[in-house]
Image (spheres, rainbow, N blue to C red):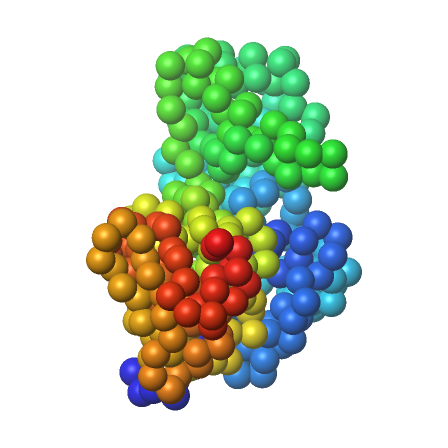
Amino acid sequence: MNDAATLLDVCDALLFDLDGTVYRGADPVPGAADAVSRARSRDTPVRFVTNNASKAPEAVVAHLAEVGVPAADDEVSTSAQAGVRLLAERIDPGARALVVGTEALADQVAAAGLTPVRTADDGVAGVVQGHSPDTAWPVLAEACLAIRAGAVWVACNEDTTLPAERGLLPGNGAMVAALRAATGAAPVVAGKPETPLLRLAADSAGSTRPLVVGDRLDTDIAGAAAADMASLAVLTGVVTPAGLLAAGPGQRPGYVAADLAALDEPACRVAVGPQDGWHIDTGGDTLTVTTAGTGDAADPMALLRALCDAAWRTGIMAARPGDDAAATALADLGLT
Ligand SMILES: [Mg+2]
């Protein structure tokens, strides 16, 4: 890689997480629309990848339009699509599949050449389970009977919670947990941090070197790591600098940035690793930070990349400043 190659140069597709990366609920993430449009102007394929199985791609496209990001239906990859693909690989064409989820999920089942049903009739070959706010005990009872009778069970995702205006609500994983408890069985899982959804998205873009971009280490970045894909963590959603320093081996992004503007920066600068402008002393039980050399000494993001590198090598997560500039940068990162 030459030193000037940007993140857009080093990948052949961008797989964007949505909430916390492109938008936050009803609000756009500042700069996200620009970043997506610059990727398009470079002919880099983009995919919007969502664990939420309750919405059809057209509904995701409609919400993206509301936050200023134009997208086409075939640029959206959902855990419903990935879950149904997993099911279709495991049961016969035309076979009955019990749907625990929305009509959008049932539509996906039908589009895959399977027969969506809502009761555990004789001959149900598979169960596909995705989030629906209408899922109640009667449909879980049908799924329980089908799974106990030997049906293949696919969960679109296992997110235990669903962020909403009023707080965290039960996610699909919570309903999956009920069936795990009642059946003793375990589903095949499509969504992040499992790999099928990310692979579906990369395949649909014809990509062999995708960059996964997201705000959560336990789903986006862990999924990328499991799928052996490069990843960029952005600070516009869930993950914090302290969370990055504490990331376990399966949840460490190769790239870290404040936001999607970094897609146009040299990849070697956005990569986690030592930085010219900062020196980190790893002796003792604290990472001691001082400014060094002639690099971007005032750049807190550069410091964060250097701290991640040091913390992940040594297991030391506590940082303290060795000079005034370091104190300012650590405070900017919320690390003091
Ligand atoms: Mg997110």
Residue situated furthest front in the rendering: 323
* Position above or below: 10 against 253: below
Q: Position of residue 89 (x, y in %)?
A: 38, 41
* Position above or below: 272 against 294: above
Q: Is residue 62 left or right of residue 314?
A: right
Q: Position of residue 103 (x, y in %)?
A: 67, 36
- Give the quarter of the image for residue 302: bottom left
The foreground one among 176 and 166 is 166
Total numbered circles: 0
* Position above or below: 324 against 167: below
State the residue at coordinates (58%, 41%).
Answer: 53
State the residue at coordinates (65%, 18%).
Answer: 136
The foreground one among 61 and 125 is 61
State the residue at coordinates (66%, 57%).
Answer: 23
Q: Position of residue 331 (x, y in %)?
A: 53, 60
Asked whether residue 117 appears in the rendered view, the answer is no
